Amino acid sequence: MKIRDIRCAGLRGATPEGGWSTELKPEDCVHTLVVVHTDAGVHGLGSVFTNDALVRAAIALLEPLWRDENALEPQRVSEKLHQHTFWTGRGGSVTHAISGIDIALWDIFGKATSQPVGRLLGGRYRERVAPYASLLMEEPGRMRDRLLEVKAQGFRAFKIGWGPFGRVDARMDERIVRAAREAVGDDSRLMVDAGASDAFWPNGLKWALNTSRMLGEYAVDWFEEALRPDALDDFVILRRQSPVPIAGGEVLTRRQSFQPFLAAGAFDIVQPDVTKVGGISEERAIATMAEDHGVTFVPHGWNTAVGLAADLHLASAFPGTDLVEYLTGSPFIDEITVGGWQLDADGMLTIPTGPGLGVELDRAAVARYTGDSRLW
């Protein structure tokens, strides 16, 4: 089965806020869908955390490498794309685009073998997984109201991040966390994301240490992106001294970037994003490396329904991964798949059992948010 074509289309018109200091507008494109077509008529779905113009250019750049390749060998083909593009974008938009291609090739592999991706990754340790509702922070009153609204939808785990946190003062930070804990209750999991990958993050190690102690008083499950993404030495110190687990890694790409952080003991929880790290093949390698270092793997999932499906299969394939991120209120997750997503009575998501990723895109919804039906 050979690769004959790769098409992409950017999602626009309902782009959710990202929490960035230069905030996203609904018409901005930061997520791009990819469809890989084969000579056997089988197609695969992928997703990329990058603007569609960059993805389209990367697909064209890579075309001599992917055209007529074996669509049933995702890991080998993706590694070929990585190996031949060290000088044209390792770790940047080219790597992000390869992520989408890789996810789509795993989808094809599963469809061709009539197996879910998780089984092809070595086996399924679970049939369902807990999604944590991921929300941007607001001032305490609105934060409480928003969390109560989402809790009523059935979620049992929550992450709050970005917004005013770390950007006003320590009193505001604690007020937000206190309001959040009161809203979700003591029986729910609560995580906090500082969002230190934002442009010109103002805080350093001392702020992170002091804040971690405050978070410990509210039984926070982990403290995410507490430091600028490249502050390896500070992450090591923070992890050793923090009373709460330290999480990070969402902006890193390829396994080579994760290796020094894992080897140095910088994280308790590592969070690669399948739509930019290099796809399922690369994320599996990172998750295996994390296991070897005693670090928990929890996918970063602030992306699309296709990314969520990939995360669910990855979670099924690793015994220690009991959570996936769920970006609440995004049409690019809630509206573009046939049937959508439903929580069960325990607040869990069932991992798809159908071939490949086990999801089908709603073509009318995709056309509404891409303005382009040529994906198929």
Image: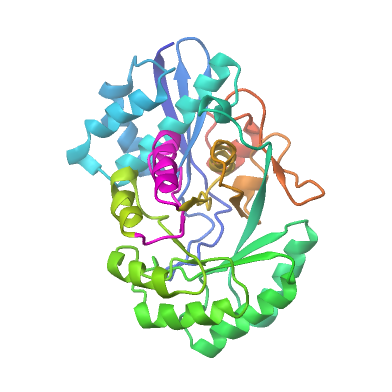
Residue 337 lies left or right of residue 272; in this view the side is right
Residue 152 coordinates in the image, percent (x, y) = 80, 62
Nearer to me, 348 or 368: 348
Q: From the viewer's perspective, is residue 270 above or below residue 218?
A: above
Q: From the viewer's perspective, is residue 197 above or below residue 8?
A: below
How is this picture coloured?
Answer: rainbow
Residue lying at 56% horizontally and 86% vertically, measured from the top left: 172
Nearer to me, 275 or 283: 283
The outermost residue toward the left is 87
Residue 135 coordinates in the image, percent (x, y) = 61, 64
Q: From the viewer's perspective, is residue 346 above or below residue 187?
A: above
Residue 49 visible in the snapshot: no
Residue 336 coordinates in the image, percent (x, y) = 64, 40
Residue 82 lies left or right of residue 284; in this view the side is left
Residue 144 visible in the snapshot: yes
Residue lying at 45% horizontally and 83% vertically, measured from the top left: 210
The outermost residue toward the right is 345
- Quadrant in which the N terminus is drawn: top left
Residue lying at 56% horizontally and 47% vertically, measured from the top left: 321
Residue 28 coordinates in the image, percent (x, y) = 47, 54
Labels in figure, total:
0
Tell me if residue 270 is in the magenta stretch.
yes
Q: Which residue range is magenta in the image?
A: 265-294
Nearer to me, 163 or 185: 185
Say which quarter of the image contains residue 216.
Answer: bottom right
Q: From the viewer's perspective, is residue 227 above or below residue 58?
A: below
Tell me if residue 68 is in the magenta stretch.
no
